[in-house]
Amino acid sequence: MATDHAIGIDIGGTGIKGAVVDLGTGELVSERLKVKTPEGGRPKDMLKATEELVDQIDAQLSGSEKLPLGVCFPAIVKRGYTLSAANISDEWIGLQAEDLFEQALGREIHFINDADAAGFAEVRYGAAAGVDGLVILTTLGTGIGSALIYDGVLVPNTELGHLEIGGEEAEHRASGRAESFPTPVNSSTAPAKYSATVSRNVRRSRERVGAAHAVRDGRGGPGRVRRSARDHAHAPESSSSAGRFEPVRPGQSGRPRPQPARRARDRKSLKGRDRRRPNAAGHHAR
């Protein structure tokens, strides 16, 4: 079915959104509508909620033609099958979801992972268009989705938010950290104590950055090894092979470079060569 428009449906863990999209520009050409995701996220209940949403969108259209439908879904999707379930019922795992929706809604449907849909849209219409190399897109909602694009080609179903870190899924760890943070405060109405804390943290960060640059550029700073002229004058000569440090000069790395000390036997042999006199042929006498 050739058409310039299609209906986009985004099924999430807390809401189902939909609108008509211009396939040439990627822009919405109708009002964006939303219904609540049914409790439990079971296929039968979510299909019914999607039907209601699509009927509302169809009511906005003037023609009688049923537009094709693209469904973004929070799961691994292969050949129309949903192979995982994030923040929805496990009944979706292994379900032939694309055929189920086509039969219920009576139109052409394409199922795709929600983050992959966003990544493909960025390649075609947005920030990733014409970009070489690797592009990583993340979607932050009820869960965390990810899309990887390499040289304009989508690598589907990465689902980095479900990688296990310390025995827990990454998106669950991130959600726990986010809930522990205080609600952002407008700087113009923030309490003096909050503002002072922010200012102190910013100042400390700047000091750390400045110290790191000083070490790099040879202007001193934490971790730099210095020896005064008096230290050099009174330092005993070491006969060991342990290195001694020379000062860091501009353009060098911040880590002092060890210089090998001359051995005592090397100094003695050098003095012995200096005392030998050359013979008539110009060679040192043995």
Image (cartoon, rainbow, N blue to C red):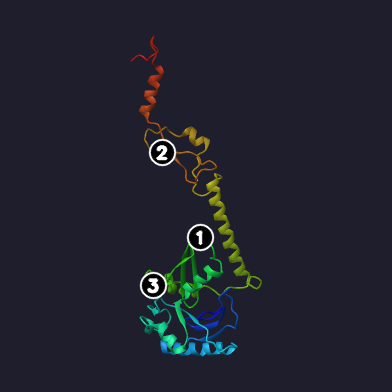
Who comes first in sequence, dot 3 or dot 2?
3
Image-based side of 172 in relation to 62, left or right: left
Q: Position of residue 40 (x, y in %)?
A: 42, 87
User: Nearest the camera: 29 or 247?
Assistant: 29
Q: Residue flagged by tag 1: what amino acid is it?
A: Asp
Q: Residue flagged by tag 2: what amino acid is it?
A: Gly
Q: Residue flagged by tag 3: what amino acid is it?
A: Glu
User: Nearest the camera: 7 or 3?
Assistant: 3
Q: Position of residue 263 (x, y in %)?
A: 37, 31
Q: CA distance from mark 3 to mark 2?
A: 47 Å
* Residue 112 position (above or below residue 264): below
Nearer to us: label 2 or label 1: 1
Image-based side of 238 in relation to 14, left or right: left
Q: Which mark is residue 101?
A: none
Q: Which residue is mark 1?
A: 132
Who comes first in sequence, dot 3 or dot 1?
1
User: Nearest the camera: 276 or 235?
Assistant: 276
User: Nearest the camera: 26 or 206?
Assistant: 26
Q: Residues within 10 Å of mark 2 (few under 14, many from 20)?
A: few
